[in-house]
Image (cartoon, rainbow, N blue to C red):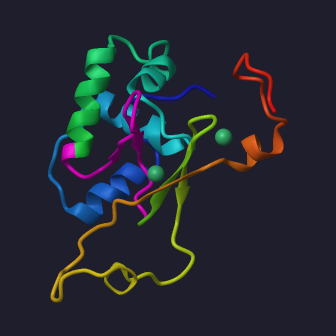
Amino acid sequence: MSPTHRMPAKPTGLDCRLAVLGTEMRLTPHRREVFQVLAESTNHPTAYDIFDRLKDRSSGISLATIYNCLEHLTAHGLIKQVQLDRGQSRYCANLHEHVHFYCDTCGRVIDALPAAEFDAAKFWHLPPGTSVSRLDISIHGICPACTAKPAKTETPNPQP
Ligand SMILES: [Zn+2]
Ligand SMILES: [Zn+2]
């Protein structure tokens, strides 16, 4: 099975998203490819990760092109930029309302969808009459994989 660059047989997540937005934006093959990589990825790749995955199968793609595509897709609301305290920006193509869980040990960013109807205006004290348009909440901790692993010796100092 070789991935084809143009004319997907059935509508992709991107096509659905574009239909919902009613956006008449033109998507270059590169932008499509970048979106596809993001949509298929479960771990919020960085621009480098995306470049790594596309450089062999997409002719003429450069890191600069990737950044360009990411900027364009973010600006049109097709993907989200995931801000981390430090390090590379990551990107998310999960279009459902969700927040991000950051593993402080391995750096994984995991999507967390709401488990129940959630009203930010009821959960936090906001000025009366506030209208909430989106949530930008991050949750930090240790992911299940890291929790299961025996603690690594990261510091030369002996543990007490
Ligand atoms: Zn996400
Ligand atoms: Zn982890």
Q: Quadrant of residue 22?
A: bottom left
154 above or below 25?
above
- Residue 51 place in picture, x, y as percent: 42, 20
Quarter of the figure with the C terminus: top right
Residue 18 lies in the magenta-colored region:
no
152 above or below 102?
above
Judge by depth and name the residue closer to the eye, 113 or 5: 113
77 above or below 45?
below
Judge by depth and name the residue closer to the eye, 146 or 155: 155
Determine whether, in the image, residue 121 is placed left or right of residue 100.
left
Q: Quadrant of residue 132?
A: bottom left
- Residue 25 place in picture, x, y as percent: 16, 46
Q: Looking at this rendering, what residue extends furthest in the front direction?
A: 160
Is residue 4 in view? yes
Is residue 7 in view? no
> What is the chief secondary structure element of the magenta stretch?
loop
- Residue 32 place in picture, x, y as percent: 34, 36
* Magenta region, residue range: 75-96
Counting labels gives 0
Q: Residue at x 29, y 67 (%)?
A: 134
Determine whether, in the image, residue 17 is placed left or right of residue 92.
left
Judge by depth and name the residue closer to the eye, 4 or 14: 14
- Residue 149 place in picture, x, y as percent: 82, 38
Q: Residue at x 33, y 16 (%)?
A: 63
Which corner quadrant of the figure contains ligand 2?
Answer: top right
